[in-house]
Image (cartoon, coloured by chain):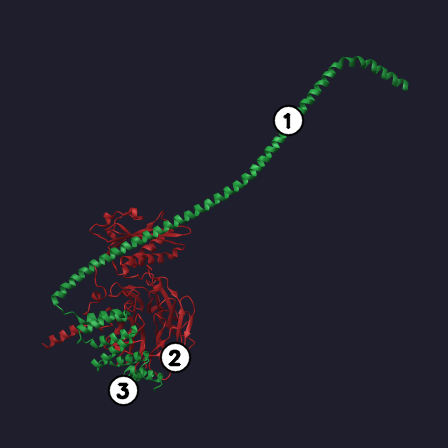
Amino acid sequence: MKAKFLILLILLGSGFLQAQDPDAVIFPKPTPTRLAVADFTPKTSSTPDTQTALNVFNQVLLDDLKFSAFFELPSKSFYPLKPLRTPQDVIFENWQVPTLDIDFLAFGSVQVDATVTVVEAYVYDVKTRQQVIGKRYTIGDTTLIRRVAHEFADQVVYELSAGASQGVAKSRIAFSSLKGDSKEIWVMDYDGANGRQISFNGGINKFPEWSADNQMLVYVAKLPTVNRWQLFLHEVDGRPTEIEVTSSYVSSPAFARDGRVAFSSRTQSSREADIFIRPAGGGPARNITNARGIDTSPSWSPTGAQIAFISDRTGGPQVWVMDADGSNLRQLVTEGGHCDSPDWSPDGRFVLYSWQAPRQWKHDIYLAEVATGKLFQLTSGFGTNESPHWSPDGRHIAFQSTRTGTKQIFIMNADGRNLKQVTTYGINESPAWAPYVEANRLGQ
Amino acid sequence: MRQLFTLLTLCFTVLILPLSAGTKEEIIRLQSDILQLQDQIRVLQKNVDEKNGMIISLLEQLNDQAAEGNVGFQELVTATNAAKAQSSSLDRTVQSVQEELRVLSAKLDETNTRVAAVHRKLEENQVQIQSLRTVEQSVGDDIEPDRIYSATFNDYLMGNYALAVNGFQDFLANFPDSEYGDNAAYYLGDCYFKQGRLDLAIQAFEQVINLYPKGDKTAVAYYKKAQALQELQRLEQAIETLKALKQLFPNAPEAQLANDDLIKLGVE
C-alpha cells in the first residue's frame, strides 16, 4: 500500500509541470487554415539565374509559412502537376479534391533579367475563387530574393490571420557568437541566414538586447585590455558607445520601449548585484532593488510599468516581478532549483524562463502565467536549454541548446513544437529576437 | 601717195555703188523690221515690267502672307505643344487614376479577405461560445475566478486601465473571498492611480489597507496612497502615510522607497 502511495506521489510529482497543456492556453485551436504553396515558376524563360532565384524563393517561402504556425500545409506530392504562372492557369477544381481540400492557394512567378528581377505573387481563396493577395515585387539585385520571399510570407500570414500576426519572416535575431578567439555580437535573419558581425572588439561580448526601433543594441563586454565588464549601446549600422556604470560588474541589460535601460550591477559599497535603471535620455542609473541578495536578468513588461528579474533573496535564484520603481515586489516562481533569463511576453501574459529543477543537471524552458503563477514546461529531452526569448508576435521562442552537442540557437513554436536549429558554426548563445517596430506595421 | 588713195577710193566707189543701190530696199525693210522688233521688244519689256511688278507685288503679298503664316504656324506649334502637354498630363492623370483604382482594387481584395477571415473567426468563436454555454449550463455558476482574474490582470499589464477597472470591480463584486481579492483591490487602486483619478485611487488603497491588513499588497498600498497624496499636494497626510509604512513594514522594499520620499520631503 505504501509502495503504491509512493508511486502515485512520484507520478503526480513528475506530472506537475506537464499537467497544464500549453497548447490549450497559448493556441486556442481554431480550425486550422489549409494552405497550398505551389512552386513559383519562371515568368517567361527558365534561365539559369531565374532557376537559381526560384530555388531560393520557393524554399524560403515554404519554410516561412510552415514555421508561422498558422497553417496546415498539405504535402506537395498531392498537388496537381500543371505549373501555375498566372491566375488564368489555376483550375480550382483540381485544388479541391479530398486529398488537398485547401482553403487558400499561393503561387506566382519569378523572372531574372539583366537589370531587374520581378516576382509576381498571388494568393487565392479556393472556395470563393477570389484573389486575396496580388503583389508584384521588383528588385535590382537577386541577392534580395530571400527578402522578397520573407516579405510575401509575412503578407500571407497577416492577411490570412485577419491581422492577428504580422509574421516573423522579416524579423532578425541578435546573439553572441564565439568564432575563433573572440565572442562577438552578431545579427542574423530569424532563420539563420545573412549573419552579420556587429562588434569587433576582440573581447567577450554577451547578452544583446534590441531597442524598440530595432536601430540599437545594448550588450555587455569584457575587452582584452580592460579589467572590468562594460555596458555598450551600439547602433546596428554604426559604432558602440559605452554607458558608464559605477561598478566593474554589469550584466544582462534590457531596453524598455521608451528607451530606459535596466541592467544588473553593483554599487561601490555592495558586493551583491542589484537592478539599476538608466533614464531614457541618459543620466545616472538608479538602483531599484537595494536589498539583500543577488538580483540579475531584468526583463521589461510590454508597457514598461513592471520588471521581471532573477533574485536569490529567499534562497535559490527564482523569478520575481516588481513595478519599475521597485515597489510591489512579488515572487512569481517558487519551485526552488535555479531559474534564469526571464523574458516577458509581448502580450504581457507570460514570463518565459529557464529552470534547472532541484537535483537536475540541466535547464529547460518554462512559461509562468504572470497573473496566477501557473507554470508550463516547453522543452525536455537531451541537452540543456537556456536563454529563451520571445518572437515579436509572441507565437515563437528562440533559445540556446546543447541538444546537438555544442551550444547553438534554436527556434520553436511557443507550445514547444516545430523545433528548428538556426546556427551551426561556432558556439552561439543569448538569442534576442528583435521586437516589432510600431511604425512599420503591415497594413498601416 | 595722195593719188593712190584717191584711185583706191574711186575704185571702191565704182564697185560698191551699184550694190548699194540694190540692197537699199532691203535695208529699209530690215530697218522697218528692226523698228517692229524694237516696238515688240518695248511691248515685251513693258509686259516684263508689268509682270515684274505683279511678281514683286505677289512676292510682297506672299511675304506678308508668309509672315502671317509664320505667326499662325508658331501659334499652331504652341497650341500643338500645349495639346501634347495636356495629353501627357491627361495620360498621367489616367495612369494615376488607374493606379489608384488598382490600389483600391487590391485594398478591396484585402478587405474582402480580412472580412472573410474575420467572418470565419466569428463563426469559430460562435461555435466556441456555444460550447462554452453548454459547459456553463452544465456547471451552473461555477466559473473559475482565477481565469477571470487572469484576463483582467492582463488588461492591467497591457495598460488597458479602463477595461481593467471594470474587470476588477466585477471580480471584487462576484468573488470577494477569492485568494486574489487583495490583489484585485490593490490593482483597482493602481488603475485609478495610473488614470490620474487620484481620489478614487486613495479610496481603493485605503480599502486594501483596511480589508487586508496582513495581505501581501498592504505595504505597497500604503506607498501608492502616499504617492497619490503627494500628487494632490496633501503633504502632511503623505508624510503620515509614509511614516506608518516604515513603522509597520520596515523590511518591505517600499520602506526604503518611503525613506527616500521622506528625505525628498525634507522630513528625514
Q: Categorize mark 3 by other alpha carbons within 10 Å: few (<14), some (14-19), many (20+).
A: few
Label the red chain with its letter. Answer: A
Where, by quadrant of the figure, is residue B164 drawn? bottom left
Left or right: where does residue A62 sit relative to residue B177? right
Numbered badge on residue B247? 3
Could you say where residue A73 lies in the image, as x and y percent from the top left? 25, 56
Chain B image colour:
green
Q: Which amino acid does label 2 sit on?
A: Ser
Amino acid under label 3? Answer: Gln
Binning the other alpha carbons within 10 Å of mark 2 as few (below 14), some (14 to 19) or many (20 upward) gives: some
Please provide percent x and percent y for residue B225. Answer: 28, 79
Observer-nearest of A367 and A156:
A156
Asked which secondary structure carries label 2, the reply is loop
Element assignment for label 1: helix
In this picture, is A377 found above or below B125?
below
Note whether residue A319 is visible.
no
Q: What residue is drawn where x is 57% and y is 35%? A: B62
Q: Do the residues labelled 3 and 2 touch (CB within 8 Å)?
A: no
Residue type, numbered disc 1 = Asn
Give the residue at mark 2. Answer: A248
Nearer-N-terminus badge (3/1)? 1
Residue B231 location (% of width, % of height) = 32, 78
Q: Mark 1 points at which residue?
A: B47
- Between A428 and A389, the one lying in front of the other is A389
Residue B249's quadrant in the figure? Answer: bottom left
Instruction: Identify the chain of the residue marked 3, using the numbered disc in the image.
Output: B
